[in-house]
Amino acid sequence: MTAIARLQARPGLEAAVRAQALALVAPTRAEPGNVSYRPYEDPAAPGAWLILEEWADAESWQAHLASPHLEQALSRTASLLAEPPVVRVFPG
């Protein structure tokens, strides 16, 4: 399955969102069932991010949503982002 998240940093907090997005790569890639996890910042819109995630199955992704590193990141989301993340899930 594939999940795509869109994030938009609050003005002035672009560096903090970048640091958080990149800090999630290693622990997420180490999770069972993770196939890939790739954050991309839009070069035409600094602070706008797409996070592309591929998981072996829905159960792996659900476990990721409950992982300590993601829960910690999500607890900071409201203060860092201009709007709630938009997440689309594509079963595969």
Image (tube, rainbow, N blue to C red):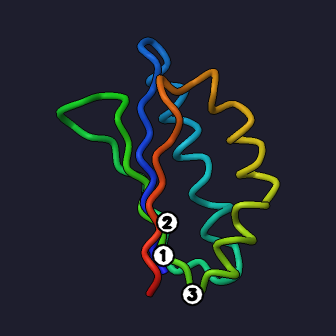
In which quadrant is the C terminus drawn?
A: bottom left
Q: Which residue is mark 1?
A: 54
> What amino acid type is highlighted by mark number 2?
Tyr
Q: Which mark is residue 37?
A: 2
Image coords of residue 2 (percent x, y): 45, 74
Which residue is depicted at the point 54% across and 35% down?
A: 19
What is the crowding at mark 1: few (fewer than 14 residues within 10 Å), some, or many (at least 20)? many
> What amino acid type is highlighted by mark number 1?
Glu
Q: Which residue is mark 3?
A: 56
State yes or no: discs 1 and 2 in contact (Cβ < 8 Å): yes
Which residue is depicted at the point 57% across and 24% down?
A: 80
Label 3 or label 2, whichever lies nearer to me, is: 3
46 versus 34 height, above or below: above
Label 1 or label 2, whichever lies nearer to me, is: 1
The answer to whether 21 appears left or right of 74 in the picture is left
State yes or no: discs 3 and 2 in contact (Cβ < 8 Å): no
Image coords of residue 48 (percent x, y): 34, 35
Residue 89 vs residue 44, the one in the foreground: 89
What is the crowding at mark 3: few (fewer than 14 residues within 10 Å), some, or many (at least 20)? some
Task: Give the CA separation, mark 1 to mark 2.
Answer: 6 Å
Image coords of residue 85 (percent x, y): 50, 41
